[in-house]
């Protein structure tokens, strides 16, 4: 029996409750997350994995936040102290970390707080081959171990070595989406001072693409705008640059570059659901009869397109762990979320903003040559079928009570169906809405979609009135 060398200091329950989220660890540095806690998380992650079988190593990457190198190094120390070798890949996007996990067959940790402000940092964990770790698939065990202190076994410590995986990542992306015959085009890319500023030049090197870079300087203080493209205000620079340069397309990435948003040649924002429908169509052309996963706030256009292409569409709850789980069970070729996350079977079922952007370029390139080339807005028109509200958040003290009241007001209406897969979804023939409680804040999230803007406005206003009452 291996002797215990040491034990990490216990972490207070209140602190753990604030930093251990549904899918990752995230908090303000150093008030909530510091090197000592990251070292303990490294040891706890090894302990969790060891309970499932032998741990042959760990791969660790980090983003451009000033605190990331120190926190990643502390985590690696905790892993090594638990007897496991660590491969540090340095500055990386989250999908590059997933790629390293897949190519090396190792569990991984990515230090990033995605689009959160500069004072935050966090850790996204995965098992070997980028398999997810969430609250229901390992994070709860890690949280429990941190609360009592993680035992550090006696015996040899692991090694910590460095390896550059950028070229391997680029090669794998191009094996998934072939851009060999891409036609000349102008592409504006807004990296938001995040990791796409590092990966984009490598991914598009050698292609006949005129790349207009916006905010490629790696800067975790985000001096230009928040690296969160789901907020329309953060896309204004990209929209203006696309129009100014007469570009064919604009791509925007979040801080860790695992999400991608698209702007068309007119400077108009493309719905992530429309991009999901396009990619689903492309993947089903490659694999007829395949399965595509979509979450329940994604546009109805996605399952419609999948059915028209002869595929099978499977609806899931919101959240990457649910999508990855269902993809694994069904062998799905692709999964899409309205939040801008896109998942690929040939990328270990992990999400990659860069692959989504490459799909858009490949589709646009195949739409014609020279004067016969179809503009992106025309290419996407068949997939853009509904008006959508976007996610509308309301502060609500008792979310369950409000959802119950909304259910009661809609359940008896004719030609209306209800389901509670994730919150409450109410659907009519040409419209639907979903109300979900936030996992971390006193918020209700409302999404509405309808065939016409008039119907969208009517449903949205009625449900918002029910959520917010007279104070709305």
Image (cartoon, rainbow, N blue to C red):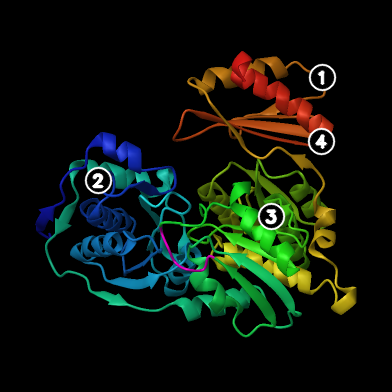
User: Number of marks in the image?
Assistant: 4
Circle nearer the N terminus (2, 4): 2
The residue under label 4 is 453
Residue 102 horizontal side relative to residue 279, left or right: left
Mark 1 and mark 4 in contact? Answer it, CB < 8 Å.
Answer: no
Q: Are marks 2 and 3 in contact (CB under 8 Å)?
A: no
Q: Secondary structure at mark 2?
A: helix
What is the secondary structure assignment of the residue under circle 3? Answer: strand
Residue 63 drawn above or below residue 296: below
Q: CA distance from mark 2 to mark 4?
A: 51 Å
Q: Which residue occupies the foreground of this view, 26 or 375? A: 375
The residue that appears at 49% across and 79% down in the rendered structure is 168
Label 3 Cα neighbours within 10 Å, binned few <14 / some 14-19 / many ≥20: many
What residue would you read off at disc 1? 414
Dot 4 crowding, Cα within 10 Å, few <14, some 14–19, many 20+:
some
Residue 292, numbered circle: 3
Q: Quadrant of residue 365?
A: bottom right
Compare marks 3 and 4 and give the one earlier in the sequence: 3
Q: Give the mark nearest the N terminus, 2 or 1.
A: 2
Q: Which residues are magenta?
A: 215-220
């Amino acid at each position: 029996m291996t002797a215990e060398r040491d034990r990490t200091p216990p972490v207070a329950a209140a602190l753990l409750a604030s930093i251990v989220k549904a899918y990752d660890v995230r908090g303000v540095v150093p008030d909530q997350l510091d090197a000592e806690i990251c070292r303990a998380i490294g040891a706890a992650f090894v302990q969790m994995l060891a309970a499932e079988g032998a741990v042959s190593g760990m791969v660790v990457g980090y983003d451009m936040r000033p605190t990331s190198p120190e926190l990643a190094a502390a985590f690696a120390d905790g892993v090594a102290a638990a007897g496991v070798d660590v491969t540090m890949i340095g500055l990386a996007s989250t999908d590059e970390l997933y790629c390293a996990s897949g190519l090396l067959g190792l569990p991984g940790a990515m230090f990033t707080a995605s689009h959160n402000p500069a004072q935050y940092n966090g850790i996204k964990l995965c098992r070997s081959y980028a398999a997810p770790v969430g609250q229901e698939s390992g994070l709860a065990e890690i949280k429990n171990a941190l609360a009592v202190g993680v035992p550090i076994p006696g015996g040899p410590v692991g090694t910590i070595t460095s390896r550059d995986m950028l070229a391997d990542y680029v090669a794998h992306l191009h094996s998934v989406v072939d851009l060999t015959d891409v036609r000349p085009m102008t592409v504006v890319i807004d990296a938001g001072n995040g990791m796409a500023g590092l990966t984009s030049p490598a991914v598009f090197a050698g292609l006949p693409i005129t790349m207009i870079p916006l905010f490629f300087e790696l800067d975790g203080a985000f001096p230009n705008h928040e690296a969160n493209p789901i907020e329309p205000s953060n896309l204004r620079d990209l929209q203006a640059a696309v129009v100014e340069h007469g570009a064919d397309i604009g791509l925007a990435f979040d801080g860790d570059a695992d999400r991608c948003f698209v702007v068309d040649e007119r400077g108009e924002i493309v719905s992530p659901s429309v991009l999901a429908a396009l990619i689903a169509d492309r993947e089903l052309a490659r694999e007829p009869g395949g399965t595509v996963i979509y979450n329940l706030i994604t546009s109805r256009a996605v399952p419609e397109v999948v059915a028209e292409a002869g595929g099978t569409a499977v609806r899931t709850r919101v959240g990457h762990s649910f999508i990855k789980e269902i993809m694994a069970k069904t062998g799905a070729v692709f999964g899409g979320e309205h939040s801008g996350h896109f998942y690929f079977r040939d990328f270990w079922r992990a999400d990659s903003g860069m692959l989504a952007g490459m799909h858009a370029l490949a589709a646009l390139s195949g739409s014609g040559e020279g004067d016969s080339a179809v503009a992106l807005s025309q290419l996407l028109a068949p997939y853009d079928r509904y008006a959508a509200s976007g996610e509308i958040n309301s502060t609500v003290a008792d979310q369950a009570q409000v959802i119950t009241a909304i259910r009661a007001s809609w359940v008896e209406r004719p030609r209306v169906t209800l389901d509670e897969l994730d919150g409450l979804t109410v659907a009519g023939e040409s419209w639907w809405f979903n109300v979900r409680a936030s996992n971390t804040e006193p918020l209700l999230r409302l999404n509405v979609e309808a065939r016409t803007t008039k119907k969208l406005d009517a449903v949205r206003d009625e449900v918002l009135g029910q959520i917010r009452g007279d104070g709305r």
